[in-house]
Image (cartoon, helix red, strand yellow):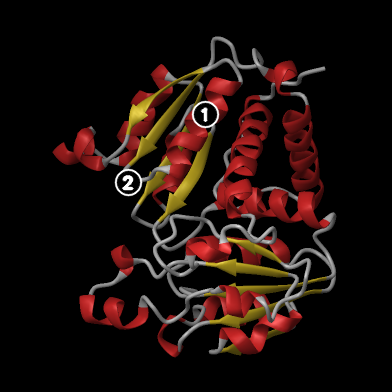
Amino acid sequence: MRHLMSPLDLSVEEVSDLLDLANDIEKHPDKYAHACEGKKLATCFYEPSTRTRLSFEAAMLNLGGSVLGFHSADSSSASKGESVSDTIRVISCYADICAMRHPKEGAPLVASEKSLIPVINAGDGGHQHPTQTLADLLTIRSLKGRLDNLTIGLCGDLKFGRTVHSLINALIRYNNVKFVLISPEELRIPDYIREDVLRANNIEFEEVERLEDAMPQLDVLYMTRVQKERFFNEEDYIRLKDFYILTKAKMDLAKKDMLVLHPLPRVNEISVEVDDDPRAVYFKQAQYAVYVRMALILTLLGIKVD
């Protein structure tokens, strides 16, 4: 039995196989429509989510399985003080696989150590969001045709953005990937990512404040929102939330085949005028997330479809 806590839990070869399976699901959905008949996915979401929770539910339903779970800590026994270890032991009696989101870093890992079923980390605090990373990789590979030889711009909240941390960890395993880290001083990537991940692996990167300066060299621009829920001080949030807004004028500075990704939800960091640009692929990215979560559920349950 395997769990998924981090993108690095899968080897490069396993990621490639997973993305191949997701692409096959995209092309032949009917082939997989009954693959998980009789199987149940538990969605244990201790903090709010629209896309991730519904995407997991859609993935399991598309595979012919069923779903049970809760969508906030208030609607679970966590509100009575139950630990995640106890919760997962009970959930293991009801379901075949579990997707867990939790505001505390490491909570899904703690759950996985006591679980009798595979646990998928669906986001833990500001730490990791591996299935979003798999969706990002699938989007880039499907639309660019490769995951190597890319210059990736990461823009916005690089300090608390778990999607950014997961994506960097995943992409450093591919050849000739360069990062341009675009953020205000207060939201720069954490030291452990800069030192233990980028510098320790001799990955080329630069840190800049102006989005305009970075645009011409990028193959992929990964936008993120400034996350209100990660701030202790509302004044800091208000001051930083409009620091970057991607507009049509800024898009004019970019390559004709650059991709714009965003894990969503968007607040106002991408102007709606950009939505109609063919390079804006964040809604396609949400669709790719369903395919990759379908592939992951099949893989962790050991189900093969001929």
Q: Which residue sits furthest top?
A: 38
* Alpha-carbon span between mark 2 and mark 1: 17 Å
289 or 72: nearer the eye? 289
Name the amino acid type tagged 1: Ala
Q: Quadrant of residue 146?
A: bottom right
Name the amino acid type tagged 2: Pro
According to the image, label 1 marks what residue? 58
Q: In the image, is 247 to the left or to the right of 7? A: left
Q: Quadrant of residue 38?
A: top right
According to the image, label 2 marks what residue? 48
Residue depicted at 40% across the width and 70% down the height = 226
Above or below, 43 relative to 242: above
Q: Position of residue 212 (x, y in %)?
A: 61, 86
Q: In the image, is 16 to the left or to the right of 98? A: right
Whether pointer 2 and pointer 1 mark residues with C-beta atoms closer than 8 Å, the reply is no
Q: Is residue 203 visible?
A: no
Residue depicted at 59% across the width and 79% down the height = 249
- Quadrant of the image containing the N terminus: top right
| SS state under label 1 | helix
90 or 305: nearer the eye? 305
Q: Is residue 207 visible?
A: yes
Residue depicted at 43% across the width and 69% down the height = 160
Above or below, 32 relative to 70: above
Q: Earlier in the sequence, mark 2 or mark 1?
A: 2
Q: Which residue sits furthest left?
A: 80
Q: Which mark is residue 72?
A: none
Q: In the image, is 197 to the left or to the right of 127? A: right
| SS state under label 2 | loop
